[in-house]
Amino acid sequence: MNARRLTSTVWAVVLTVLYLFLLAPILIVLVESFDTSSYLRFPPEGFGLDAYRQVFANEAFREGFRVSGITAAATALLAVVTGVPAALALTRLRFRGRAAIEAAFLSPLLVPHIVLGLALLLILAPIPLTDTYVGLILAHLGVTVPYVVRTVSASLVSADPRAEEAARTLGASGLMTFWRITLPAIRPGLLSGGIIAFLLSFDETVISLFVSGQHTVPLPVAVLQYVEYRSDPSVASLSVLLVLLSVVVVVLVERGLGLRRTLRSG
Amino acid sequence: MGDTARRAPAGTAGHLVLDGLAKTYPGKDGAAVRGIDLAVERGSMLAVLGPSGCGKSTTLRMIAGLVPPTAGTVRVDGRDITDSPVHRRDMGVVFQSYALFPHLDVARNIAFGLEMRKVPKTELKRRVDDALSLVRLGHLAGRRIAQLSGGQQQRVALARALVVEPAVLLLDEPLSNLDARLRSAMRDEICRIQRETGVTTVFVTHDQQEALSMADRVAVMNHGRIEQVGTPEDIYERPARPFVAEFVGRANLLDGTAGDPDGERTSVELPGLGTVSAAGARVARGRTAVVMLRPHRIALTAAAPGTGGARGTVLSAGYAGETVAYRVRVGDTGPVLDVERPTGAQRSFGPGAEVELSWDPEAPRLVAAVEDSEPAEAAEPVRESLS
Amino acid sequence: MTADPADGPARAPEDTRAARPATAPPAVKAPPRGRGPGRLALALLAPGLLALLLTYALPLVWVVRMSLNESEEGGAIRQTLSAATFGHVLGSGHYWNVIGQTVELGVLVTFFTLLVSYPVALFLARTTSRWRSLLIALAVTPLLISSVARTFGWMAILGTQGVINKTLTGAGLIDSPLHLANNFTGVVIASTEIYMPFAILAMISGFGRLDPALEHAAASLGAPRRTVFRRIVLPLTLPGVLTAALLVFVLSLSGYVTPRLIGGGRVFVLATEIYDEAITALDWPVAAVLSMLLLAVFGVVITLYLRAQRALEARFTGPREAGS
């Protein structure tokens, strides 16, 4: 006995090692976030919440959090407002050039952010909109709209278009049908698209690097600049806090807006 | 044509009247619907029967206003509604997928049409309750759609369409999403509800049993045209065209040569079977004619020497419980006929058995002359042969 | 039968005729309905298209335009239409080095990422364990954490004071710390981990043809496990692997954060070079030319991918018509 057991043991070992590799930086970040030393070292000198205190004391982080929050909220809102009608047209209407326009809406996903960042710098700098909220939001819009279009289109495709027709035959006008039938049907896609847009914008580093300056510095850029010159555990603590925050946001949105219920009944 | 008991033209009594209704989709060859003329009497139930792709659903969607016709008109009570928008048409539609609103419960689904009509709250409540009890779902008012079975969803869809008291009820393949047992129960249920409400109803189906058992009248469609309209009995017993004979029930279609007319009947020379006298369509002497023989109307007896009937050889016998399905070759080189005999008292035959075929004189029907192969154009010669 | 037999078939077609007024042929309507959807579609698409135009299409056109300008002494830009900047960049050994290192990094990272992701993806696609969804969630958890933070984690692992070196020296296995950070090796290691979740996701969704019944069928036909893997599993999973390869390669070509932080200023790839030219050196024409070169490499990679994909698909669907 038994080749079979040997194979499965080998599998288990290989998978454990690979998972460890995959999760290593996260685990280290978690451990380091409680380190009390003033620079990065292993093993940690001692465990405490000093690093977390430093995060809140850091003016650049606090300001960056505010800038990223405002930018991400505005970007998500704009992405939803522009993306939802586009998704409606792309899934519910037949018109010439539909496939080409659909491809155009997804194409920003193909362009490297380093190129897009440069491109936005070149066009925003002369206006000048670099280092402003407007510039940041515009810069983030192009890369978030495709996600909204995609998630909303997916909900629209899975929702029965006959339900909209049924509403029409029951006397609902086009606008009423959208409001009473289509919008509730696409709510899951709309929410997840909006959340994805928010998180992407909040997390966007490379494009922001090009279009931000000294005054409007989003959090990832502030962190990057910090890490370049210093290596103390407060960045680890900040990362842990951000993960917790994004989990809290997702859970709250899900609870508050009944995402789960909508998903289950749909 | 010197016929006697002709009905009044259906158009004058029609509640819902289609006139030359046609639909051509851009970029596609040929028309989906090629000019439908149809009149549905008030309070009656009409089935539109045809194979998939024959244009029946497009026709229904044109009546509902969901598809704009390329030509023709739709009239209800004499009023032309061809250009009215969907939401002002007053049509109750039950979709094949039911198209219930997943985010609303049963009662709110049913109330939707009343809300659109701004029906006052108390009346709305009463009418929703009435509709729920009409479809016997009073106990499920608060349920979510996802919690309902297929049959219950079907009832909700019916209630939602009927609660607004539509001029016409349109059903698109109403039973196709149900399993076999539920289907026959829902069939009776739809008939009961239609009788109780007296609403003029059009339903579309590809299932001939559904059409024959539920409808007052059946319109058989093929290739975007109506092949025949009539009572279920007309359609089954007196098909006007080969397509109808084959699509509704099983049929042996035999090509022969028309002989002399004999009153209402025509004698037809069938190769291998001799001369039969068949009622039905008129075919000029010497022209090719098609004779229909339903498999269950052919009797088989053991071949005995001396009798003069048609003889044949059993090629195969398939036992199917209530009946046995035979394939019988007539003579040595004649046509192969499908024959269906009840099991039990009847004597059964095995492959190779020599049998004698017989039928009562009313069994053969002359369905039409043989036309050119393009079925879509087939309707025209019949009309000519009739007029 | 009670009805007059002659009445049946004769009556039926007559009915369909009766509804039509004897004189008028069906009126052909003018087609005003055709335009509706087009105009509505345009209205619905307009905000989105405008957003794309302003924030994506127009800026990219600007890059192309900028690549044809020249920079002068002191950082001024001369508006012109020339290939001089292209010539300057392509004539310089430094930039060729950067391109070479970018491609080398992409190839190595792609190779290692596929190597470590394939077993995980294969396991996740096939397992029926009740831990499956937890394990999938764990595999994509890193995506929740910004790449800056994960790169920071790798700095803590690979640095001279990091986990690996401290552990190894502590155990007496090495005397002087290994050089794992601030160089090319470190960038490859960290990038491999950073792109792993993407590769796993792409592979799982590309493993749709994998069906346990096929493996059982092969085994029942007498194939040993190794042969089942080589003849059944590997060919069926190849499309997913190919997609993952494209994704990882494209991501690593344009990756900026990891080369900059782990590279410690010693690893030069197109992405870091574009940033430095644009922000530090303020030489926008050169940055634009480098962007065009990055896009060109992209184009080559995607073309190769599409070729390979077509060849793979042909095995399942039969060869396409020539010339397609």
Image (tube, grey):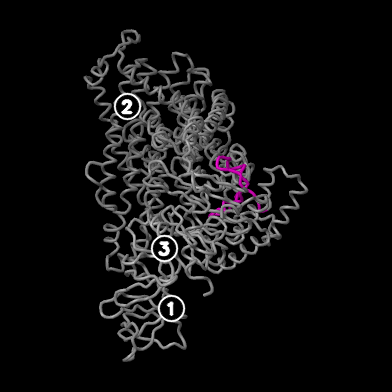
Q: Percent from the top left, x then y, of residue C95?
A: 26, 23
Q: Percent from the top left, x then y, of residue B250?
A: 42, 70
Badge 3 amino acid: Arg
Q: Which residue is mark 3?
A: B241
- The residue lying at 35 percent from left, 23 percent from top is C274
Q: Percent from the top left, x then y, of residue B31?
A: 41, 47
- For marks 3 and 2, give the one nearer the viewer: 3
Count neighbours of disc 1 (C-alpha within 10 A) and say few if under 14, some if 14 to 19, many if 20 or more. few
Is residue A45 among what the camera can see? Answer: no
Count neighbours of disc 2 (C-alpha within 10 A) and say few if under 14, some if 14 to 19, many if 20 or more. many
Query: Quick one: which residue is furthest to the front in this view?
Result: B2
- Region rendered in magenta: B78-106
Q: How far apart, in angstroms, are the residues tagged by discs 3 and 2? A: 75 Å
Q: Is residue B105 magenta?
A: yes
How many numbered circles are shown?
A: 3
In the rendered structure, which disc, 3 or 1, sits on the residue that comes first in sequence?
Answer: 3
Q: Which residue is mark 1?
A: B361
Q: Which residue is mark 2?
A: C270
Is residue A239 among what the camera can see? Answer: yes
Q: Quadrant of residue A250?
A: top right
Badge 2 amino acid: Leu
* Numbered mark located on residue C321 in the image: none
- The residue lying at 42 percent from left, 39 percent from top is C163
Q: Quadrant of residue B372?
A: bottom left
Q: Quadrant of the N terminus of chain A?
A: bottom left
Q: How far apart, in angstroms, are the residues tagged by discs 2 and 1? A: 92 Å
Asked if labels 2 and 3 touch by Cβ distance under 8 angstroms, the answer is no
Left or right of A50 on screen, residue C108: left
Indicate the chain on which mark 3 is placed: B
Q: Are marks 3 and 1 on the same chain?
A: yes
